[in-house]
Image (tube, coloured by chain):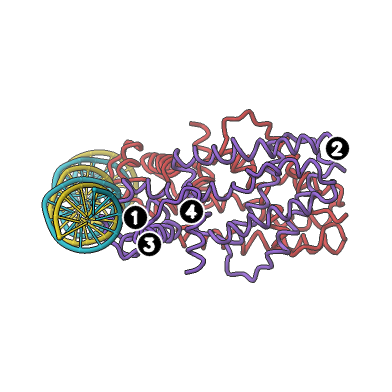
Chain colours: A red, B purple, C yellow, D cyan
Amino acid sequence: MKEFEEMMNTLHPPSEEKKLTPKQEQILKAAVEVFAEKGYASSSTSEIASRANVAEGTIFRHYKTKKELLIAIVKPFMRGFAVPFFAARFVNEVFDVPPEKLEDLLKTLIKNRFEFVKENAPLLKIVLQELAFHPELKEQFQAVFYDEIFPKFEAAIDQLKEKGAVVEFSNATIIRMIMSPIIGFLVTRFLIAPDLPWDDDKELDQTVHFIMHGLSNS
Amino acid sequence: MKEFEEMMNTLHPPSEEKKLTPKQEQILKAAVEVFAEKGYASSSTSEIASRANVAEGTIFRHYKTKKELLIAIVKPFMRGFAVPFFAARFVNEVFDVPPEKLEDLLKTLIKNRFEFVKENAPLLKIVLQELAFHPELKEQFQAVFYDEIFPKFEAAIDQLKEKGAVVEFSNATIIRMIMSPIIGFLVTRFLIAPDLPWDDDKELDQTVHFIMHGLSNS
DNA sequence: ATAAAAAGTGAGTAATCACTCACATAAAAA
DNA sequence: TTTTTATGTGAGTGATTACTCACTTTTTAT
């Protein structure tokens, strides 16, 4: 229960707190469950309602359509994931830190975001699944990642290239090479084999090690 | 048209040729299209039928259920992808090749599999999407990848570890680090941004470079 | 040529779907 | 307290769904 309340807090951060009624929270919780289990298209509003101990009409009182319910769940998750990247420090820290400390900086950042995803694992599944079919989600994704996070990454990468610390691939390629192993780990960790006895810290350290060596200019 | 016939050949390889009727081919082609566009759950058999210029009943003449149609599409694709790995040479080649030539060997293999995926891009999307929700597909995936391909990879990795050519991560971690950037490229190349002016050879070379350096024991 | 089997058809069906609406209750405002 | 507004309800609805079946056409076997 505690965990879910925390999740709901990240879904609806204090900044624009919407004062959800208890039933509304039950609906969101149940919807996350069902969407993650069966996928959006195979989830019925009637099942969400019954699992939330709520009449079906109550769902449509708060969310005009089923898709609006999906967006109400996914949007805050994406924004929540991006929060630390909005910190003004982000790019500057990468600029200033000596290259040998860069690995530690990345580890800290990644471990922080890992914890966020860990607390919202079903949301990760929903996003990865539904991003492909809902233009509204793609737009939100673009707004958060392409327009906000990636440019900051690019600035940092350009700086590292000038220092000769990073291999001379295109920025898009480098970003892909940074993200692929991380996403690969997250997907394996939480979606494919969540029940394996994972040593998360070790895996993350090794993943960052892999990325840094893969991109190093040797 | 030519391309699709080739795809159908890979879907139903000569080894167990099922002598598909023309209408059956139309059904498979249309189903691949619609499943990839809308996702399995949101695809209706009536749309598949009309897009295949076939009566809806014809679909169920050949495939008892909608899910059986999905499996008829996905199963041969996975088997087709795995074919080169079944070659007895596979592990031995990795054993015998001198470490500095290993990168070239991997490049050849990956470029070969890349072409296969390129010819069946919609199938890649269908597999990635539906694997999460259909136990039958998971079983097929397990049979092909976990039971057949991965053990061969492990044997090769163990050998490389003994030579000290590869970092001492667990085999599962190493396999993940090999596959993540490749899948990351495939997904970006064919699903996220297929219309970008890609230099496939360059990207693949750089991806292999990234993997080899990331895993090197330095 | 004739029979038998396979392929193809499309109207029909029961189930399920997202969503509505008239009404009931609870909370807030007056 | 009285009125207004917000929240909650569940039976009802038209549309859509996967799938069936009696029938026709085509292909294959004899």
The residues bearing labels 1 and 2 have C-alpha atoms spaced at a distance of 58 Å
Any mark on residue B11, and which? 4
Mark closer to the observer (4, 1): 4
Question: Could you tell me the amino acid type at mark 2?
Answer: Gly
Task: Find disc 3 in the rendering and name its residue.
Answer: B26
The residues bearing labels 4 and 3 have C-alpha atoms spaced at a distance of 13 Å
Task: Find disc 1 in the rendering and name its residue.
Answer: A65
Mark closer to the observer (1, 2): 2
Where, by quadrant of the figure, is residue B46 drawn?
A: bottom left
Question: Could you tell me the amino acid type at mark 3?
Answer: Gln
Mark closer to the observer (3, 2): 3
Mark closer to the observer (1, 3): 3
| Labels 4, 1: one chain | no
Where, by quadrant of the figure, is residue C8 drawn?
A: bottom left
Q: Chain of mark 3?
A: B
For label 3, count other residues whose C-alpha is less than 10 Å away and answer few (under 14), some (14-19) or many (20+): some
Q: Position of residue B210 (x, y in %)?
A: 77, 53
Q: Quadrant of the C terminus of chain A?
A: bottom right
| Labels 4, 3: one chain | yes
For label 1, count other residues whose C-alpha is less than 10 Å away and answer few (under 14), some (14-19) or many (20+): few
Any mark on residue B164, and which? 2
Q: Give the structural element (helix, strand or loop) at label 2.
A: loop
